[in-house]
DNA sequence: TTAAATAAAGACAAAAATATCCTTTAATAT
DNA sequence: ATATTAAAGGATATTTTTGTCTTTATTTAA
């Protein structure tokens, strides 16, 4: 027993976010990328990434095409797709709604000992994720202001 | 593949926080509780909780005594022990310092695409955890204002 | 129409987190 | 001293998450 980890999101979710940002950052006209290209761009395990992309296709955040020149593209408007949607698709909404201490019935009426303290954090986090759209974030990458790997 | 979880802390960490709060909430004079009592109070698996309490003893957040009337007590001043310390002891400091998207070298110079957005959240979270002391939180439990289980 | 490219799907493997059980050690009380 | 109580430690089991591999299905291009 020697835990040294626990971060905000699962690895699957991180790969999903990174992949979505990468695809969103593709130049106009050629907005389709294959699995190999994506997992190379975000430095993620290829086969595992494939599974995650499948999930994103299922929830219609991505569209996919088989065959030569196939691959994945953002489905919908990158301007209105938020990181919150990607997180919800992969990790579910526990990060937005779950009790920090794991109480099943934690609420205003029956709060856990840190309920009110975490409420503010959650609202801050949720608000940020809801207002972070793919387009804006992908632009940072295209401008060389932020990075998808290392 | 059907993830539906991911919360802020590991279960181990949640049990640790709850256990610390419970022990801190014990009445003056009798501030020692056994494993059974603790895991019943916080509704956690007994044997697993034992391992976590051991860790907390090792990092000297708890003291322990064997034999009849043995058990666990807060080591030090509950007024100055913070939730941040408990989290760091069990989950490490990734929650405070790690990159949200998992980049190894994420920094101001080489930021991930959401680095700046998460910075504020992290600071908010860290500040809150650093200023939440056991004493204050345990009082809420003693006053019947908050709950350790269900 | 066939070959090549690519995603989808399913089975499987490895690693980590969670959880249990059993034995040992230490303290207390009789 | 001895029996009892309770934590410590170690081995093992289960579940979840992460990751791989192989086959199938679909599309494109020659």
Image (spheres, coloured by chain):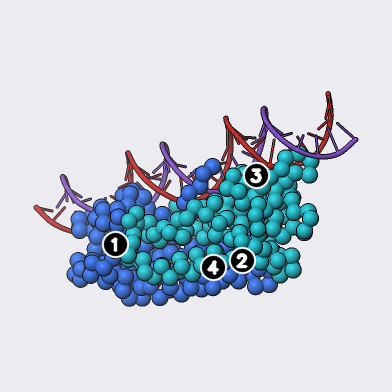
Chain colours: A cyan, B blue, C red, D purple
How many angstroms separate mark 4 from mark 3 (CA)? 28 Å
Q: Where, by quadrant of the figure, is residue D14 drawn?
A: top left
Callout 1: residue from which chain?
A
Compute the Cα span from label 2 to label 1: 34 Å
**Horizontal arrangement in the rendering, residue B121 relative to residue A43 (left or right):** left
* C-alpha gap between disc 1 and disc 3: 42 Å
Residue identified by numbered label 2: B114
Is D10 on the left or on the right of A82, as rendered?
left
Have a look at marks 1 and 3 and say if they share a chain. yes
Horizontal and vertical percent position of residue B92: 49, 62
Residue under disc 4 on the same chain as residue under disc 1: yes
Q: Nearer the viewer, residue B91 or A1?
A: B91
Asked if one can make out residue B110 in the rendered structure from this viewpoint, the answer is yes
Chain ID, mark 4:
A
Q: Nearer the viewer, residue B113 or B87?
A: B113
- B110 vs B82, left or right, is right
- Residue at horizontal 26 percent and vertical 57 percent from the top: B41
In contact (CB < 8 Å): disc 1 and disc 3: no
Does dot 1 land on a helix, a strand or a loop?
A: loop
The residue where tag 4 is placed is A128
How far from the left and from the top, in percent, is residue B40? 26, 53
Identify the residue at horizontal 66%, vertical 65% (top origin): A137
Q: Element type at marker 3?
A: helix
Mark 4 touching mark 3, by CB under 8 A? no
Q: In this picture, is D10 found above or below A141?
A: above
Residue underneath mark 3: A50
Q: Earlier in the sequence, mark 4 or mark 1?
A: 1
């Amino acid at each position: 027993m020697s835990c040294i980890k626990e971060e905000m999101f699962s690895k699957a979710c991180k790969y999903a976010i990174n992949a979505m940002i990468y695809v969103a950052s593709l130049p106009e006209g050629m907005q389709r990328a294959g699995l190999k290209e994506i997992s190379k761009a975000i430095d993620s395990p290829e086969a595992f990434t494939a599974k995650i992309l499948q999930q994103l296709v299922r929830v219609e955040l991505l569209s996919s095409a088989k065959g030569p020149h196939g691959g994945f593209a953002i489905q919908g408007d990158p301007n209105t797709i938020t990181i919150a949607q990607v997180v919800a698709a992969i990790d579910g909404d526990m990060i937005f709604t779950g009790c920090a201490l794991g109480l099943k019935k934690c609420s205003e009426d029956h709060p856990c000992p840190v309920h009110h303290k975490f409420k503010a954090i959650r609202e801050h986090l949720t608000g940020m994720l809801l207002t972070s759209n793919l387009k804006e974030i992908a632009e940072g990458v295209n401008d060389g202001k932020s990075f998808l790997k290392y």
